[in-house]
Image (cartoon, rainbow, N blue to C red):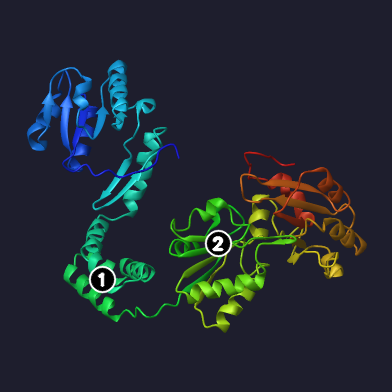
Amino acid sequence: MDYFPLFLKLKDQPCLVVGAGEIAARKIELLSRAGARITVVAEEVHEHVASMQAALNLVIRQKSFAADDLTGMRIAVSATNHRASNEAVAAAANQRNIPVNVVDNPDLCSFIFPAIVDRSPLIAAISSGGSSPVLARILRAKIESTIPTAYGRLAQFAEDFRLLVKQEIKQPSRRRIFWENMLHGRVAELVFSGRMQEAEQELRTRLGEMDTSDNQGEVYLIGAGPGDPDLLTFRALRLMQQADVVVYDRLVSPEILEMARRDAEKIYVGKQRSNHSLPQESINELLAKLALAGKRVARLKGGDPFIFGRGGEEIETLMQQGIPFQVVPGITAAAGCASYAGIPLTHRDHAQSCTFVTGHLKDGSINLNWKQLAAPNQTIVIYMGLVGLQNICQALIENGCPPDHPIALVQQGTTPQQRVFTGTLRDMPQRVENEDIKPPTLIIVGTVVSLHEKLNWFQTQSHKDE
């Protein structure tokens, strides 16, 4: 972040605005909405600013700026058309450690004005760090259209009953759940429609019915998709943002993890070949232990939890102990990586079926139905097969696939780091030895691979087609 977002309380605080033109007038109006006591310093005062003097109780000093004008000020804004004057204001403010904004001069600013969505007391601010104020305003307009003005009334309602709820529900995690239910349910709808007395009665009723001794949590088994954060489902995102704990594996990208609630505890349980941070049985018990302690647990798994994700084993443990859970499907690696590589998994001219298998080595071998996998007119998707690629290619050839049968490797599919390698069963093992190919990599076998060059739509920043 180039700028750290903060909200300043400026009510009754002295603020300086240097300049008195139309741009300065806009900043004066904005500061006045926050209750600031504003002093304006300018040699020439525009009629718009002059007309605001009585209504906003402005102090206007018609003179050139001097460093002493900053004495006692909480913040300073320079809105003149003169670079030298703006530089003088910025230098004097920085010398006194007073935050300063110079309009349209980001290099002179120690803070910037964001685009604001005002649903007081609920405030949202959007900033581009000064790089594109127009883009920030466009995003503000989008947010404005999705947040009704009644949300300000809802925020005030929550503030009015905050102390009561805190007195009745001592445990912070239980209190958070109560408020989430209130602000998403009937109470919120009553507030939105202006029926405040009914909303208060409903909240008090629900508060009286709440069993604060019920401390059991819940587990959300969430498919995090193949890597691109945009491929998360709405439900996955909603549950991630209400979870108290996030348990995640190595295939969950940092960008996806960032979407979880900021104050949620993060626990890494990733597994790599011959390097398991936690055995699967320990992960199962960890989820149960956290839920029994009253936590809402988001178990994030790359791809889909029920496709080579061992999600079934995890919920078996939860069921045995009577722990509530939800399962949120995700876009599996086969669908995501194939799509982003421009390789359709089925195609009427190439493949009328698609088979998912795991290429995980056990005792140095891969135990699969090779005769079935070598049959024509199908696509084979192999998870976790990079280490055993030599064995896979050899077994397919020995069981009837032609040596020049197409094969593709998709490394870090759906991400900006995606790399796609295409070749044949005969030459791909040697290519892997020559290239720096690492997991996570998905293997696709079938004549659909021949469509990659024609349908390759996803161009990454770091690599084009290999």
Measuring 76% from the left and 58% from the top, which residue is drawn there? 349
Instruction: Indicate the position of residue 391 as horizontal and vertical percent values.
Output: 87, 60
Q: Amino acid at mark 2?
A: Ile
Check residue 94 in the rendering and tell me which mark sits there, or answer none: none
Badge 1: how crowded within 10 Å, few (<14), some, or many (20+)? few
Residue of label 2 = 267
Q: Indicate the quadrant where residue 317 lies.
A: bottom right
Q: From what the image shows, is residue 261 above or below residue 280?
A: above
Residue furthest right as drawn: 398
Earlier-in-chain disc, 2 versus 1: 1
User: Which quarter of the rendered picture does the C terminus lie within?
Assistant: top right
Give the structural element (helix, strand or loop) at label 1: helix
Instruction: Indicate the position of residue 327 as horizontal and vertical percent values.
Output: 54, 71
Q: Is residue 21 visible?
A: no
Check residue 167 in the rendering and tell me which mark sits there, or answer none: 1
Badge 2: how crowded within 10 Å, few (<14), some, or many (20+)? few
Q: Nearer the viewer, residue 456 or 131?
A: 131
Measuring 32% from the left and 67% from the top, which residue is drawn there? 179
Q: From what the image shows, is residue 402 above or below residue 116?
A: below
- CB within 8 Å, label 2 to label 1: no
Q: Nearer the viewer, residue 265 or 380?
A: 265
